[in-house]
Amino acid sequence: MKSLLKRTIFSLGVLCATFFSSDVFAIDNNIQFYSNENDVTVTQKEYDFIKNYYGEDFFEEMTLEDLEWISDLDINNNDVTINTVYLYDNDDLNKQSSDRGVIHTTPSKKLTIAKSCSSSCIVTTYLKWLVNPTVRSYDLIGVRFHNTGLSNNTVITKLNSSYGTSYSYNTQYLSNGVGTSVLLPNGATNISVEQKVYTTLGGTVFGSYQHAISDITLQDSYNYIMSAGGYGSVFLFTNGMGNYYDAMNGVDISL
């Protein structure tokens, strides 16, 4: 499949990939750098972000709708930051440099957070399923704010899968965060869920994705508040609903 992809380089030089605990893309390069079979063309800065945030395989199926979502981050004019601390379920491999990592990987899914800031910030949280989930019910993706908050009420949550792209509007706006209930589609493969929020500058955003391990209703999925003591330091469930979610660790990023 990758042989079908085409890369166009308009400048001389060698592209070097370097991985740090925090990647800041500050290359001043607004020319076209890469294109795929869907005629999606990105600059070098956009390419570097996509490779580190979504993974290299994302380029094969990337669409113009995906590019529009990414373009909102204004990567060519802003420094987009991704912290890249990895955590593992196996304690013997648990060599993270902090108690909370900004990329959390389990055998089943990977959670990532990124920011793009100028006078305000755009924060995106991305959950990629590495296997096909067995239970397909109302999962949760959301963020909790510490010393920051929404700059407007725009919260966009999209689900990508083998069935295409859809959007979820089952969002709760709380005083210290937002959460969206996302119904996983039966029979779909290659599932990912991403949420975008617009915040004020400063403070910290905590992100979490909680997978429903039993079938629940949409109304049941709303039984939570935002708390540092909750799952992923975000979702503190009420009415016993914590027993229905997988308690996956969270991610965070400073603005």
Image (cartoon, rainbow, N blue to C red):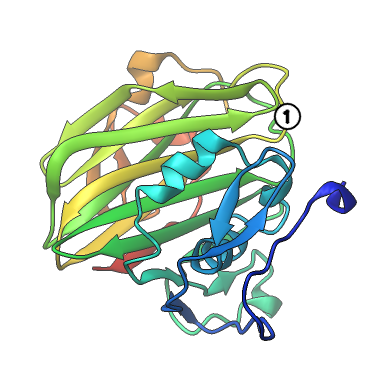
- How many numbered circles are shown? 1
Looking at the picture, how far across and down is residue 35, in whole percent? Answer: 67, 52
Looking at the picture, how far across and down is residue 168, in whole percent? Answer: 40, 23
Among the 4 quarters of the image, the one containing residue 196: top left
The answer to whether one can see residue 134 in this image is yes
Looking at the picture, how far across and down is residue 135, in whole percent? Answer: 64, 25
| Residue under numbered circle 1 | 189
Among the 4 quarters of the image, the one containing residue 152: top left
**Residue at x-position 40% and y-position 61%:** 114
**Residue at x-position 65% and y-position 59%:** 34
**Quarter of the image with the C terminus in it:** bottom left
**Residue at x-position 79% and y-position 50%:** 5
Looking at the picture, how far across and down is residue 213, in whole percent? Answer: 58, 31
In the depicted structure, whether residue 165 falls above or below residue 46: above
The crowd level at tag 1 (other Cα within 10 Å; few <14, some 14-19, many 20+) is some
The answer to whether one can see residue 227 in this image is no
